[in-house]
Image: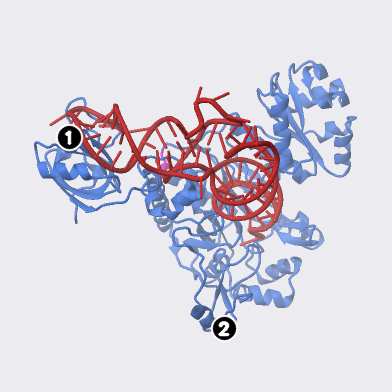
Chain colours: A blue, B red
Amino acid sequence: MLKSHRCGELRKEHIGHKVVLAGWVHRRRDHGGMVFIDLRDSSGIVQVVFNPQTLKEAFHTASSLRNEYVVQVVGEVTLRPAGTENPKLATGEVEIVAGEVVVLNPSETPPFYVNEDEEVDESLCLENRYLYLRRPRVRDNIVLRHKVIKFIRDSLDAKGFIEIETPILIKSTPEGARDYLVPSRLNPGKFYALPQSPQQLKQILMVAGFEKYFQIARCFRDEDLRADRQPEFTQLDLEMSFVDEEDVLQLMEELLTSLVKTVKPGMEMLKPFPRLTYMEAMERYGTDKPDVRFNLELRDISDIAADTDFDIFRAVLNRGGKVKGICVPGCAHYTRHQLDDLIQLSKDYGAQGLITMAVTAESSGTSGVKSVATKYLTQEQTEAVIARFGAKSGDLLLIIGDKSEVVNKALGELRCEMARRLDLLNHNLLAFAFIVDFPLLEWNEMRSCWETMHHPFTAPQQKDMPLLDSEPGKVHGRHYDVVCNGCELGSGSIRVHQRQIQEKIFKLLGYSEAEMQDRFGALLRALEYGAPPHGGIAIGLDRLVMLLAGEKTIREVIAFPKNQNAEDLMFGAPSEPDKEQLDELNLKLKGS
RNA sequence: GGCCCCGUGGUGUAGCGGUUUUAACAUGCCACCCUGUCACGGUGGAGAUCAGGGGUUCGAAUCCCCUCGGGGUCGCCA
């Protein structure tokens, strides 16, 4: 080793030790007669002092050091002189009096700061990822990610789970997301797909009798990117035999709770994790991934609106729509300009418009409310609306009437936006919650066919089995989601383990016998050979670490992420293949 | 594909029709000074065809249009 100790670990008890350190020059403070170097390695930072009286040569070298130079320092750990301790540094009670310093490698001036966490154009960070990763915050994120994975492995191992790798080159089943395809050289004209998730493989592992499987699995989806979506991402994928919903949810609650307590002991959670049905979540929060850290819940006022003279709302209700709203505390003073801004926001989220009602005196009926709607409302109706929201003087009601989906979507977004503006978000709280009782299927208007809400392997709830033939839309699936702070963290289900039921669902989805065989033949066959009842879940690991780290994008917790165009800016991937490569693969590019 | 936001020395910002723009500030860089700093300090210096192109105007970093690049989001993500 070129070093005897790690910079960040030196403490008072090391005083008097002769140490050899190696790392990067984090910062240099040159006082002419004395030079201080903050030396950084993967463990942290320690101050090194160069005094010309102790060693001329080392002092001279120290003066020539620049940021990010890689150096080796031989010196002695000493107590800092009284009054010069630095409480901001973990090593701030001590310092290294250097005797010798060697430049192991100089460095160009970095294109952006490593020693400051200033926001920089992201392309630059991605092109120079090795420099960005040197930033202590980003390094800590990557270390946190390691701790999360390690904790998961250890605790699942302790519970009897087996980690099994599944293949990356698999068969394409063109459902759901687009597949990444990989051409096969040995089978000209044929392609593998990269897994969108190991779903079918892990179910087959249950048929194989492993009973408790997990994997830290890389998954690939060729879809547009987002702050929380990368084309390749990591899932904690797990599956268990002989379980029901309660077993999986209990396991997840235990795992997530103990994980947070271990890696982020300062963070709070809601215990036990709240459970909401899909219906409740949509009604109260307008989304199936609610942020339950704050209230501002949606209230339905369709019944009141139906009796008013307000034509817009009556028309909406006649078409089967809804009138709902939220009550934003203390915003009755909003100016015309601010209200227009909210109306624009609701339009951006798909609503036709937004009715605002500023409550100025909650018990004075129409005269205590400022709104374009008051002329259509009677005294009693106004009071009923105010009562429905529990609104107080000074509150602002935001009301939307439209198709149910549009109302929920727009109000759900407005709810979150207002929470941000009113600073209602507790950033120290991880509000995990379970969403249950999802519909198994939803009707696709465009293609007029049934589609699965999640995936076709979810088992229908037993009580709804009779409805599968008559009213498929009313069947609930044995599906559950884990959400946290408005982010979909993971989803899972108890699976179908009987071939005839699985076939029935495929048929409902409009598959022909041949398509079924081609895409799911292996799984269907496996189900015939003593497939145990089983179920599991997959948790987005990048998103989990993002939430734990308090980051806004998963790119901050992935060592080498891609940009919005799915490009790797450091290596320049994707790139054009050589002609020889194409020839070997029996491929010809369109237009060449 | 739609919508929104952004693009000014290496980095981050200000400037948003002319005046104090000969483009400012901070930091970084270079040189010199400085023996207890820790975002050290001081003095001086180099460094920008204001993303690119077109237009409006007597005059454009500033207004308009197009293109390019980046981000957010909708669609999409079984």
Q: Do the numbered discs 1 and 2 sit on residues whose CB atoms are within 8 Å?
A: no
* Residue type at the position of mark 1: Met
* Residue type at the position of mark 2: Pro
Check disc 1 and report its element: helix, strand or loop.
loop
Whether residue A143 sits left or right of residue A51 in the image: it is right
Q: Is most of the magenta stretch helix, strand or loop?
A: helix
Please name whichever residue, A491 or A366, is drawn nearer the observer in this view of the structure.
A366
Q: Is residue A438 above or below residue B59?
A: below
Q: Residue A407 — which label?
A: none
Count how many numbered circles sit on residues in the image: 2
Task: Pinpoint the chain carrying mark 1.
Answer: A
* Residue A352, picture quadrant: top right
Q: Is residue A264 magenta?
A: yes
Quadrant of the rendering where the N terminus of chain A is positioned: bottom left
* Residue B24, picture quadrant: top left
Q: Is residue A402 above or below residue A236?
A: above
Q: Are marks 1 and 2 on the same chain?
A: yes
Please name whichever residue, A474 or A448, is drawn nearer the observer in this view of the structure.
A448
Whether residue A577 sits left or right of residue A101 in the image: it is right
Q: Which residue is mark 2?
A: A188
Check disc 2 and report its element: helix, strand or loop.
loop
Q: Position of residue A384 (x, y in %)?
A: 80, 25
Q: Which residues are magenta?
A: A261-265
Q: CA distance from mark 1 to mark 2?
A: 69 Å
